[in-house]
Image (cartoon, rainbow, N blue to C red):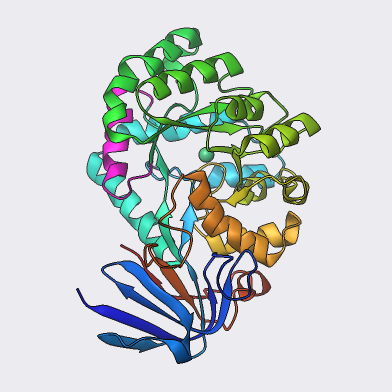
Amino acid sequence: MSSVLLTGIGELVTNDPSLGDGGPLGVVTDAALVAEGGRVVWVGTAREAPPADAAQDVGGRAVIPGFVDSHSHLVFAGDRAAEFAARMSGQPYTAGGIRSTVAATRAATDEQLGATLTRLVAEMRRQGTTTVEVKSGYGLTVADEARSLALARRVTPETTYLGAHVVPPEYAEDAGAYVDLVTGPMLEACAPYARWVDAFCERGAFDVDQARAVLTAGMAAGLRPRLHANQLGHGPGVRLACELGAPAVDHCTYLDAADVEALASSGTVATLLPGVEFSTRQPYPDARALLDAGVTVALATDCNPGSSYTSSMPWCIATAVREMGMTPAEALWAATAGGARALERTDVGRLAPGARAHLAVLAAPSYLHLAYRPGVPLVAETWGD
Ligand SMILES: [Zn+2]
């Protein structure tokens, strides 16, 4: 195994408070990093750097941990640009729009779905994302959910079974029978390809008892739980996720004081998805209130063709800073270490000895530029697996 010295780093974000400035981001200035065998083996100041087999000088640029995008839906066919345009002309978003993507996805070949998935993962990678979670949820038959997860498994270990995304049209009159399918034969076919189980707990999708049935069945099959909740209105989903000890509950746009208290006392990560509020013209979630209450916050894209067709974590950071009350440091932490917490991963989202050497070199002297220069392609280079 050969080692590589990355040096000339103007600002290195480690997310390790024992390093550098001692803050949550553990920022080391005039820094260097040594990687070997895909792992970080040393970080510190450039003048103290040990020798390595090869060296690369980044000329004063900033280096950050690769982004951990803990929420995406990349297995789909078709797009919904016309629906987006209609919303921007004043039509409201409803959960039912998912069904148009279901029809297109069922009609697509494995090759077509795989090509879209590969293209989007590459698009994310160019923007600094090195870990991505991918959900099923546009097949909604036993065979289509299982193939969606088998395809997702080719690009990431973080695969999520989301048979409970919406009730498909053929079960419109009998949602209970569909929940029986999701918790029975569909779960059995999907569990071998999935690490996580998820449900969309929302008016127009699944109620709290149905969501509880889906998550507990998945947990009994060895999957870890996560939940879509409180996106379109207030509901019991966030408290259900906390009660079940889910590592993350995602959206969290409409919360009351009891929800915030439940999140703060449970350790469940609140994953905020600003692309959704942008694309549906909804109010943004109040990240400031969550952070001030001591809740752990993650940021993710929710990349999907209906409610958030962005793959850009830098854009999410800029939007969270501008619209959700986060500081640039909090937003970067949420997009890296926060995502890692939401996926129960300790090997990514940080750059310290033992962690994976997943990083992004920015075409900027500081991570502050991620929010300061919105929409600008600032990721010069990405190191991942
Ligand atoms: Zn989602």
Residue 150 belongs to the span the image colors magenta: yes
Q: Can residue 47 be seen in this view?
A: yes
240, above or below 71, in the image: above
4, above or below 25, in the image: below
Q: Can residue 91 be seen in this view?
A: no
Which sits in the foreground, 53 or 73?
53
The answer to whether 181 appears left or right of 244 in the picture is left
82, above or below 19, in the image: above
189, above or below 20, in the image: above
Which sits in the foreground, 381 or 57?
57
> How many numbered discs?
0
Quadrant showing the C terminus: bottom left
Residue 345 belongs to the span the image colors magenta: no
Residue 105 % position (x, y):
36, 35
Residue 16 % position (x, y):
54, 65
Residue at point 59%, 38% (across, down) = 268
Q: Looking at the magenta stretch, what is its main secondary structure? A: helix
Residue 314 % position (x, y):
56, 64
Task: Find the magenta span and give its range.
Answer: 140-158
Q: Quadrant of residue 283?
A: top right
Residue at point 61%, 30% (across, down) = 242
Q: In which quarter of the image is residue 271?
A: top right
Residue at point 33%, 34% (across, down) = 194
Residue at point 31%, 54% (across, down) = 118
Residue 67 % position (x, y):
48, 60
Instruction: List the single residue furthest toward the left.
Output: 1
Quadrant showing the N terminus: bottom left
